[in-house]
Image (cartoon, helix red, strand yellow):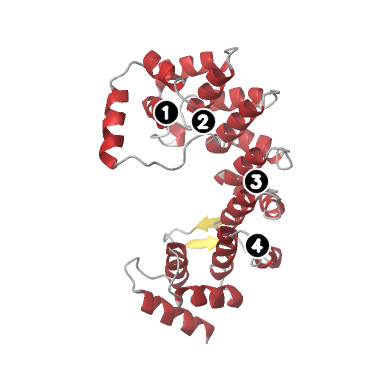
């Protein structure tokens, strides 16, 4: 999503449900008009975008494509934001306009307007096709931090031949949010086995990249580095994870990482997780 898209909601669950129901009764044309109302950090236009994404179909695609061709910058941005996750409730194979959405986003990534470029990059990040990922890979050194954030955020980038290399480079980014997301992405890179277990991508270079982030000025990046090391059974990562779980201010992510590493159920007590990590270190 674009950096302009709200990531936190202050409204109650009932407020959100009522707003969603109101928007769902609107026509596609009315919803697109609603995306242009208010300011970029208002909830209402993004609620309209969400409903349009979920509604999907040819009518929404055609209207979003029309908006992408508008002379109005906000209209182009909203059109791209809708296309970014059009038909997102369906499996990728059942999203009929995905290829066209990627082509439109690539076309707009060449624009001079910074916000349009950001929206196009986030569209490619969400769409995640081979062509989208290849385009994002070329944007790894883009001067706009939000574009680099979109690159780090792309799940499918991890499968790119240079994906690990790109993420390791972004872990050194001057922007703390980019570093955090790149560290998270590399930490979760890997494959799921037939039994449902995860096999994490691992190498001395990857572990060295995580260790380099242990002194990061951004706390979230430091935590992601610890979890990335621990999930690869690195003794230093396991030791630091245990240290956090033994403190009074451990995070949910510490608990999740310990559960994953130990292969235990989500309802395992914190003390059992601590004991499990101590046994690993022994």
Q: Nearer the viewer, mark 2 or mark 4?
A: 4
What residue is shown at x 42% (from left), y 61% (from top)? 195
Above or below: residue 32 compared with residue 255: above
Marks 3 and 2, how far apart at CA = 20 Å
Would you say the residues marked 1 and 3 are in contact, meaning their CB atoms lie under 8 Å apart?
Answer: no
Marks 3 and 4, how far apart at CA = 26 Å
Above or below: residue 33 compared with residue 133: above
Find disc 3 in the rendering and name its residue.
160
Sequence order check: which comes first, mark 3 or mark 2?
Answer: 2
| Image location of residue 207, percent across then percent down | 66, 67
Local crowd size for mark 2, using a 10 Å CA cut-off: few (<14), some (14–19), many (≥20): many
What residue is shown at x 43% (from left), y 26% (from top)? 45
Would you say the residues marked 2 and 1 are in contact, meaning their CB atoms lie under 8 Å apart?
Answer: yes
Disc assigned to residue 84:
2
Q: Residue furthest bottom?
A: 282
Sequence order check: which comes first, mark 3 or mark 4?
Answer: 3
Front residue (pair 61, 198): 61
Would you say the residues marked 3 and 2 are in contact, meaning their CB atoms lie under 8 Å apart?
Answer: no
Sequence order check: which comes first, mark 2 or mark 1?
Answer: 1
Marks 2 and 4, how far apart at CA = 32 Å
Q: Nearer the viewer, mark 4 or mark 1?
A: 4
Q: Nearer the viewer, mark 3 or mark 4?
A: 4
Q: Nearer the viewer, mark 1 or mark 3?
A: 1
Would you say the residues marked 2 and 4 are in contact, meaning their CB atoms lie under 8 Å apart?
Answer: no
| Image location of residue 64, percent across then percent down | 49, 18
Sequence order check: which comes first, mark 2 or mark 4?
Answer: 2
Marks 1 and 3, how far apart at CA = 27 Å
Find disc 4 in the rendering and name its residue.
216
Task: Classify residue 269 as left or right of residue 227.
Answer: left
Marks 4 and 1, how far apart at CA = 37 Å
Find disc 1 in the rendering and name its residue.
53
């Amino acid at each position: 999503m674009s950096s302009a898209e709200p990531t936190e909601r202050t409204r109650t669950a009932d407020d959100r449900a009522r707003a969603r129901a109101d928007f769902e009764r609107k026509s596609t044309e009315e919803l697109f008009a609603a995306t242009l109302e208010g300011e970029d950090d208002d909830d209402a236009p993004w609620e309209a975008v969400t409903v349009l994404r979920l509604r999907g179909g040819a009518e929404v695609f055609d209207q979003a494509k029309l908006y992408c061709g508008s002379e109005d910058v906000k209209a182009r941005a909203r059109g791209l934001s809708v296309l970014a996750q059009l038909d997102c409730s369906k499996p990728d194979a059942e999203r009929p306009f995905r290829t066209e959405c990627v082509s439109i986003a690539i076309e707009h990534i060449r624009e001079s307007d910074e916000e349009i470029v950001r929206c196009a990059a986030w569209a490619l990040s969400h769409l995640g096709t081979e062509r989208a990922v290849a385009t994002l890979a070329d944007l790894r050194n883009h001067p706009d931090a939000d574009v680099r954030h979109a690159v780090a955020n792309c799940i499918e980038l991890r499968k790119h031949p240079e994906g690990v290399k790109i993420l390791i480079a972004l872990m050194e980014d001057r922007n703390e949010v980019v570093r955090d997301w790149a560290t998270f992405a590399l930490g979760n890179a890997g494959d799921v086995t037939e039994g449902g277990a995860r096999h994490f991508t691992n190498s001395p270079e990857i572990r060295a990249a995580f260790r380099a982030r242990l002194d990061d000025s951004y706390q979230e990046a430091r935590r992601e580095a610890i979890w990335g090391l621990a999930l690869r059974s690195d003794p230093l990562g396991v030791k630091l994870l245990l240290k956090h779980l033994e403190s009074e201010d451990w995070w949910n992510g510490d608990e999740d990482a310990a559960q994953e590493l130990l292969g235990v159920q989500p309802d395992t007590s914190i003390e059992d997780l601590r004991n499990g990590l101590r046994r690993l270190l022994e």
